[in-house]
Image (spheres, helix red, strand yellow):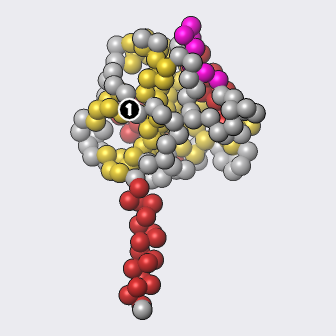
Amino acid sequence: MRTVIITAIFSLIASPAIANSLIAPGPKAGIAKSRLSATPDGEWNRLSRKDGKNVELWTLDGDSLNKVSFFGGIPVGEPLLREIDRKNHPLPKVMGNMLITDIPALLESTYRSQFSVNQMQIDSQEPALLDGNKGIRFTYAFSRADDEVQRKGEGIGAMVNGQLFLVIYEAPALYFFDKDVEKFRKLAATLKL
């Protein structure tokens, strides 16, 4: 009986880990069901949670402690994330005439609607290249109404052939953001389309 109980406990503890998968160092193609690729120099965990058709999530320590979100080729007319309440809280859509400076605003509008973000600010924006394509690098800070944790984020994005490619890193501002932001920057430097 004791063996059965111990086995049951371990299976419950292990279940969430089984749902996720390990991303080993080295080239990784087809990220977020797109032509986006990267070459991590260390291990990451890909979360099994699906936030949208062309969204993939990686973490080092868990979703709430650090997270990289890949938005791979979001087409014109589609939102960044799967809409939870399309009727009452529709999400903004990728527009064909978007400027690269509209990318941080699209993320902010999406977060305010989807995640009940009550406080968000875009801290910096600068031109950047995403695999040779004109893009934008930006930083931001936000907190959600449900937990009030101050989080920081950094992203790089570009519109390429009518599709939005965006990669963002987020973590709590206290300790965790600074702990892993350089790992994100190394990863972002390897992005290819």
Closer to the camera, 6 or 83? 83
The answer to whether one can see residue 10 in this image is: yes
- Amino acid found under the numbered disc labelled 1: Lys
Residue 116 falls inside the magenta stretch: no
Residue at 65% over, 28% down: 91
Count every numbered label the image shows and give the total: 1
Relative to 37, 65 lies left or right: right
- Percent coordinates x, y for residue 14 in the rendering: 41, 66
How would you rate the neighbour count of disc 1 (Cα within 10 Å): few for under 14, some for 14-19, many for 20 or more? some
- Percent coordinates x, y for residue 51 in the rendering: 53, 40
- Percent coordinates x, y for residue 3 in the rendering: 38, 87
Residue at 40% over, 85% down: 4
Q: At numbered mark 1, what does the secondary structure look like: helix, strand or loop? A: loop
Closer to the camera, 91 or 136? 91
Image quadrant in which the C terminus is located:
top left
Residue matched to label 1: 33
186 is higher (above) or lower (below) than 43: above
Stretch of the chain drawn in magenta: 92-98
Magenta span: helix, strand or loop, mainly? loop
Residue at 57% over, 18% down: 77
Closer to the camera, 190 or 54? 54
- Percent coordinates x, y for residue 144 in the rendering: 69, 43
Outermost residue on the top side: it is 97
Relative to 136, 144 lies left or right: right
The answer to whether one can see residue 119 in this image is: no
